[in-house]
Amino acid sequence: MGFAWKEIVPGDNYTLGMTGEMSFIEFTAITHLYQPLIGPHSVSLYMTLYHEWLLHAKESSWSSHRGLMSVMGLSLKEIVQAREGLEAIGLLRTLKVEDEQGNRHYEYILQPPISASSFFGDDMLSIILLNRIGKVKYEHLRRSMVGPSLEGIVYGERNEITKSFDEVFRHISSSEIMVTPGSETEQFLHQMDSLYPVSKGDSTEPRQQLSFSHIEPDFAFLEASLPKSVQRRRLSKDQRDAIKELVFYYQLQDMQLSYFLQDPFVYSDDNELDLDRLRKLAKDWYTAQHNGQMPEVIRPTPTNQAAGVSPAPSAKPSIEDEHREALVRLSPLALLEQYQGGSKVSPADMKIVEELSRNYSLSPGVINVLLEYVMLTNNKQLPPALIYKIATHWKRLAIGSVDQALEQAKKLYQDSKTRSSSPKQDGSAKSNSNTKRNAWNNKKDELPEWVVKQMNETPKPAGELDEKQKKQALELLKALGEIE
């Protein structure tokens, strides 16, 4: 995943293909619906390739990536990153062709955007868009777009290398979008559905399913779970693609999916699986399990920007990143079990977690940060009074994400350290404060094994290259034309 100079160099050629010219409405969708999700570089690349295709629509024309770099003013790495965004969202298919002589060539097949009705009718795309642009802009777009009235042939071995959605984006549990029953956001979405309803039956285009190359539920098990009243005992391709999307977005397990498929609610009057009902059931289940939160899909980057590309799978995450991801991923009870070596959580501690979730409405990730901070500064104890005091403070501060909670934990520790260094403290207070400081500073020794497993690895000194790396560097310079 991501840019690899061995796979593509500026001198590699490409050809373009598309089914037909786009309409003004489709251009509007690209700019206003897709751009907030994939970023301006991806949209710029799409427009550049589209207009290049128009110029050579009646003839077979080859172009080089070096020329594309000159036109767009971007590096090859930035162009590949932009291309992957288009692939992931379903606007581009990419095929790499290698002939018998080993020459490399790319075919870019532009895909038209789905209609605005299909876009706003898609739970995942519409919620991500709402999160990116806010309610005011979202309402304006929805009112405007769904309100009233409104190829060259190259011979050789073809291998499709189009990036799938789950190769570019990843799922995280987030508290940025709260859709709690009765909340302002829920009322807003209901108002949008009422004022600008999405027409689901009058679209002439087929629903374009996003592709998921690493999501593969046990369909044999799921088909065996279908009720006996369902005559067709096999799931169609469209149904399988929709289920893959639900698995990725809502992090569903096969057993939970089988429960959904056994629910009479998801079937129409003629006992056919209704995908819209299945999506609604999965959405309702997820929000019930996560205190009204909807999942968020992001495109991870080293700087956490939407328009970047995620690091290569071989790159090891830092200790801090691994720790943060664990705080996001684990449930509070699972976190406590990790600190207890896998032993069962006591009823008293379970009650604390339940109180934090139900009465303080803190997200699981924020609860994890709070519990970990208290344990590491109080000799692994969980004093309820202190926990609820911090929870009340964080609730007033509207702490909703793990990053915000970690920042607050650091401030709490710094405040504690400042008080401990005050000359007015007696010896006993200093001793107690020093104990807390040592516990927090030495948390490396206190954290579970999954946080510190990389600590003892000795990194190679900066600038030191082995023979393999030197050879790769020379090959890169030759490919870029820097040396003969």
Image: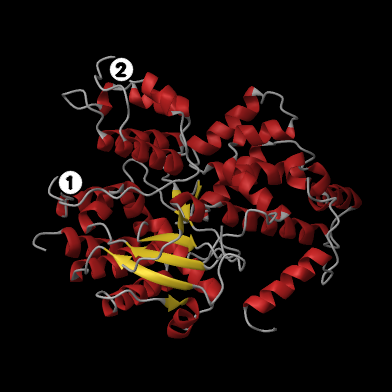
Taking 238 as reference, is 419 above or below it?
A: below
**Which residue corresponds to the image point at 26% horizontal and 38% vertical from the top-left?**
276
Amino acid type, mark 2: Pro
Q: Is residue 214 visible?
A: yes
Taking 4 as reference, is 275 above or below it?
A: above
Taking 363 as reference, is 147 above or below it?
A: below
Residue at the far top in the pictured view: 228
Amino acid type, mark 1: Lys
Q: Is residue 398 visible?
A: no
**Which residue corresponds to the image point at 48% horizontal and 54% vertical from the top-left?**
169
> Which label's residue is closer to the chain start, 1 or 2?
1
Residue at the far front in the pictured view: 100
Residue 29: percent from the left, percent from the top? 26, 65
Residue 322: percent from the left, percent from the top? 67, 50
Taking 309 as reference, is 235 above or below it?
A: above
| Residue closest to the eye, 257 or 193 | 257
The disc placed on residue 227 is 2
Quadrant in the picture for the C terminus: bottom right
Q: Is residue 262 left or right of residue 169?
A: left
Residue 121: percent from the left, percent from the top? 25, 49
| Residue closest to the eye, 130 or 463 | 463
| Residue closest to the eye, 429 or 310 | 310
Under circle 2, the secondary element is loop
Residue behind mark 1: 200
Quadrant assignment, res 330: top right
The disc placed on residue 68 is none
Q: Is residue 188 left or right of residue 354?
A: left
Q: Is residue 67 left or right of residue 205?
A: right
Crowd class of label 2 (few under 14; some 14 to 19; many from 20; radius 10 Å): some
**Which residue corresponds to the image point at 71% horizontal and 56% vertical from the top-left?**
318
Residue at the far left in the pictured view: 149
Q: Is residue 164 left or right of residue 208?
A: right
